[in-house]
């Protein structure tokens, strides 16, 4: 009986996270097109038909519809489905890693990290589509950083202030010396995230970002899909590094320093 109850709780957690990330899909889709994210019902981007309630159930609707609009047969982006699955998985992961708290669903620490990961997802996918990171997301991270001072007291003010400049300032200097080396949005993302995560995790995030972004760039060059002077969005790779570091960044740094 307890096992059944536990499964039900995990299902509730999954769909709660999936619902939130389903809304983030709306943000990712509408914001670059300068559409309101709060006004207007969800609709098919191909034929414009307003979607019914049963077509908006996270994950399940996509599978039941076969990834196509019921009216025009236009394909629903597979990325939308993956984002919803990621939302459910991340919410469960935050609950397991940071505990469930008094609510029995997720702790305050888990909720803050979940919100941060949601912002990173939006930043990564909008940057991938448009090569632009909106300042409002940096402000949101700064608000979370203020909350994190109390929620994650293990990272002192000194570590957070150093984290805000340890990566962002070198990025800014490189961008001034080499035009196009880094975008202003990338620099501000690392500054705001440094204040949120602290020094060690921020350095770890940048290392992961450079490793993954460099690997992607090398692959695209070797495959002929990019030329040497072409640019690609670096924000998604920074977001990956920051997401990993939000969970295990400090542990990776301690492990690395212990090996020296």
Image: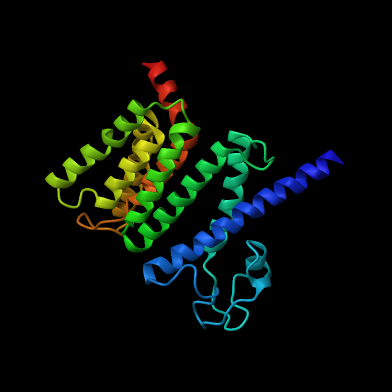
91 sits left or right of 125 in the view: right
Q: Residue at x 67, y 48 (%)?
A: 13
206 lies above or below 55: above
Tell me where residue 20 sits by quadrant: bottom right
Residue toward you, 51 or 257: 51
Rendered location of residue 26, percent (x, y) = 49, 65
27 lies above or below 123: below
Q: Residue at x 64, y 53 (%)?
A: 16
89 sits left or right of 238 in the view: right
48 sits left or right of 17 in the view: left
Residue toward you, 147 or 123: 147
Rendered location of residue 197, percent (x, y) = 41, 35
255 lies above or below 42: above
What is the quadrant of the N terminus in the image? top right
172 sits left or right of 73 in the view: left
Q: Residue at x 16, y 41 (%)?
A: 173
Q: How many marks?
A: 0
57 lies above or below 6: below
């Amino acid at each position: 009986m307890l096992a059944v109850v536990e499964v039900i709780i995990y299902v509730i957690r999954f769909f709660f996270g999936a619902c939130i990330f389903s809304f983030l899909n709306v943000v990712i889709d509408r914001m670059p097109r300068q559409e309101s994210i709060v006004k207007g019902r969800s609709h098919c981007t191909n034929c414009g038909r307003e979607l019914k309630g049963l077509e908006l159930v996270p994950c399940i609707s996509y599978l039941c519809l076969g990834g196509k609009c019921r009216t025009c047969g236009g394909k629903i982006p597979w990325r939308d489905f993956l984002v919803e699955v990621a939302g459910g998985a991340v919410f469960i992961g935050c609950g397991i890693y940071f505990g469930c708290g008094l609510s029995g669903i997720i702790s305050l620490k888990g909720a803050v990290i979940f919100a941060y990961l949601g912002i990173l997802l939006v930043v990564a996918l909008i940057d991938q589509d448009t090569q632009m990171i909106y300042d409002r997301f940096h402000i949101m991270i700064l608000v979370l950083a203020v909350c994190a001072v109390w929620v994650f007291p293990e990272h002192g003010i000194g570590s957070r202030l150093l984290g805000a400049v340890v990566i962002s300032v070198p990025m800014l200097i490189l961008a001034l010396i080499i035009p196009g080396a880094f975008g202003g949005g990338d620099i501000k993302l690392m500054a705001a995230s440094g204040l949120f995560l602290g020094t060690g995790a921020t350095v770890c995030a940048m290392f992961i970002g450079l490793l993954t972004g460099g690997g992607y760039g090398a692959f695209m060059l070797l495959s002929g899909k990019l030329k040497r002077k072409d640019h690609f969005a670096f924000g998604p790779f920074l977001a990956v590094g920051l997401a990993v570091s939000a969970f295990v960044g400090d542990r990776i740094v301690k492990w690395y320093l212990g090996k020296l």
